[in-house]
Amino acid sequence: ETGVTQSPTHLIKTRGQQVTLRCSSQSGHNTVSWYQQALGQGPQFIFQYYREEENGRGNFPPRFSGLQFPNYSSELNVNALELDDSALYLCASSPRTGGVEKLFFGSGTQLSVL
Amino acid sequence: AQKITQTQPGMFVQEKEAVTLDCTYDTSDQSYGLFWYKQPSSGEMIFLIYQGSYDEQNATEGRYSLNFQKARKSANLVISASQLGDSAMYFCAMREGLDTGNQFYFGTGTSLTVIP
């Protein structure tokens, strides 16, 4: 069983640029969530995708956007990068079986904005 | 108000001893789930244990147990027989309601160091 994989593992961008982060969900999981974890903080919910549609969003501006593909993989896009966007971005997948829905996380993408 | 509060930024425990990591939560929902995750330096969040708001018994998973006190809105994690590999960040999290699309709220975490 393949776990959640994210790419790239590290990324350096400059302010104003755009970035795309990628996530492959665990086999059999149809729901993908993205979280931002700033240094020394807990993860903060960005949004969730289910069946290729956004299915919940946290307190993040519209320049944070996403996609989910038919194979349930997902992308997180961030436009007009700001210094405060520097963080670990975690992708999590879940099966949505109706039982206890625990999140299965990838190892994250460390984004540095200079 | 914070949904999840973890008041211990760092904890130390001797190998083979037990340790309790504190977590309090804030919600007006009757249905909610409480989770603990471990985050090693690799960054991946690893699920440890789950407690549902209607569960009458405290959850246990191997060396992990959750001390659930609903009236006090606390969900402390107890790790028994600590091992060196337990050194990591530990996060308490909550999901409100029964909608599986609801977000998880995480605390700020507790850094646990196991001393040989």
Image: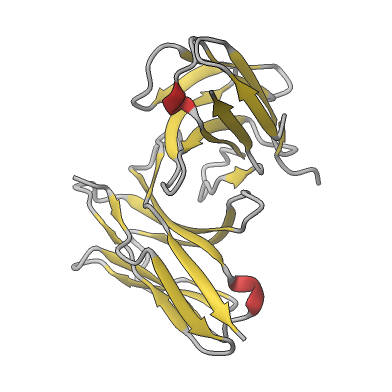
| Location of residue B63 (image quadrant) | bottom right
Q: Residue at x 58, y 87 (%)?
A: B15
A52 or B23: nearer the eye?
B23
* Residue B115 rendering spot, x and y as whole percentages: 57, 83
Position of residue B116 in the picture relative to residue B106 (left or right): right
Q: How is the image coloured?
A: secondary structure
At which x and y percent is residue A67?
Answer: 59, 15
- Name which residue lies at 48% across and 86% down: B18
Q: Residue at x 81, y 46 (%)?
A: A1
Q: Position of residue B53 (x, y in %)?
A: 33, 58
Left or right: residue B24 compared with residue B36? left
Q: Residue furthest right?
A: A1
Relative side of B104 to A101, left or right: left
Vertical arrangement, residue B63 with respect to residue A30, above or below:
below
Question: Up-down: is B86 above or below A95?
Answer: below
* B22 relative to A105, above or below: below
Which one is in front, A38 or B57?
A38
Q: Which residue is painted at 47% across and 64% down in the image?
A: B111
Q: Quadrant of residue A21?
A: top right
Q: How many discs mark residues in the rendered view?
A: 0
Nearest the eye: A105 or A83: A83
**Residue B10 rendering spot, x and y as whole percentages:** 41, 68
Quadrant of residue A50 within the rendered picture: top right
